[in-house]
Amino acid sequence: MKCAVISFTRNGAKLNRMLCRELSSQEFRVSGYSIEKYVLQPELQPLSGPLKEWTGRMFREADALIFIGACGIAVRSIAPFVRDKKTDPAVLVIDEQGRYAISLLSGHLGGANELAQRAAGILGAEPVITTATDRQEKFAVDVFAKKNHLYLDDMTVAKEVSARIVDGKNVGFYSEFPWRGTVPDELEVLEDVPDPLEMKAEKAGARPETGICIALSERIQPFPETLHLIPRIVTVGIGCRKGTSKDMLRLRLEQALERADISRHALCRAASIDLKAEEKGIQELCQEYGIPFLTFSAEELREVPGDFTSSAFVKNTTGVDNVCERSAVLAGGRLIEKKQAGGGVTIALAAGEWRAEF
């Protein structure tokens, strides 16, 4: 987690140094800044330029911002850059005496609540957390999603889930995957997905109106109002002719996902043979999807056990009888969609083992 800390007073600079030192030892990448006359080398860097410019840059580059000073300074600084709780960084405010560590923005998805507790522990301060589910010690779906690396598909429904929990109403829970731990009391487990006609025939109140669904597909609707949480566990294996465009690769990938009824948000990586390591179309596709691109040698792919779709042409060209299926399995686990070919592109999908943690 990349963290930027800014302070404005002499005592604030001392707290800044302490946070930088301690957070860096906890696997944070921390940069400390202060106005020039309070810079204490080597930990802190001088604030160059207006605070608004620094804040805008850190909103783009950092995962968390910590202001050591007044809340008003922080609020006015971040106001032009606040956009969405899915993308905004965590923002903390710590008073310059180090008495309170306040989670100001992105408490759950951004991790500000957890960071406030860490910072408070370092400084001997009191963490100030105002999110309703935390104050009532209730299940928070966005924290659960972040902890389990799940894509949360609809923030409006997520807010409704949280509101129902805070109000003491039942929220349904359905998962196509196993889980470890105890399901919170706020969630009512649904064992299977009802037929739509059965749902209409059920009496009102027979099952929760709103619920959470963990699955690779966003088409599954266990509840009238369903919040989908998508595990990011699917690897796409790719083979293609040299010079294949990103648009063609995207088209074939979307077709494969549609055929397998898998959300694009389930993708976690792409894989291929090392001959394709510099293939521009694949690199651009991965950049668009925000996923890494892994490559393997022909020898590594040949050693992958399993029943794969063999091609003499591919073997003569690459030294291995199948690229997309073998690379998907090697990088991602169990084959869930065999080779789909068209337009000079081959696509296969594999999924890793996964379970939710409560």
Image: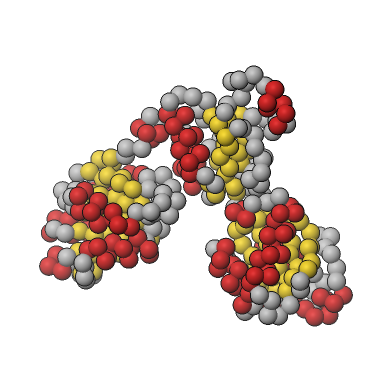
Residue 126: quadrant of the picture? top left
Residue 355: quadrant of the picture? top right
Q: List x then y, in percent, for residue 217.
A: 66, 46
Q: How many marks do you count on the picture?
A: 0
Q: List x then y, in percent, for residue 39.
A: 17, 67
Note whether 202 is above or below 254 in the view shown: above
Residue reaching furthest to the top: 203
Q: List x then y, in percent, for residue 224.
A: 60, 32
Quadrant in which the N terminus is drawn: bottom left
Say which residue appears at 13% left-offset and 58% top-offset.
9
Say which residue appears at 17% left-offset and 56% top-offset.
12
Colour mapping used in the image: secondary structure
Q: List x then y, in percent, for residue 343.
A: 76, 71
Note whether 78 is above or below 288 in the view shown: above
Say which residue appears at 65% left-offset and 55% top-offset.
234
Question: Taking the image as drawn, is residue 333 in sight?
Answer: no
Q: Is residue 148 left or right of residue 4?
A: right
Question: Taking the image as drawn, is residue 312 in sight?
Answer: yes
Residue reaching furthest to the right: 312
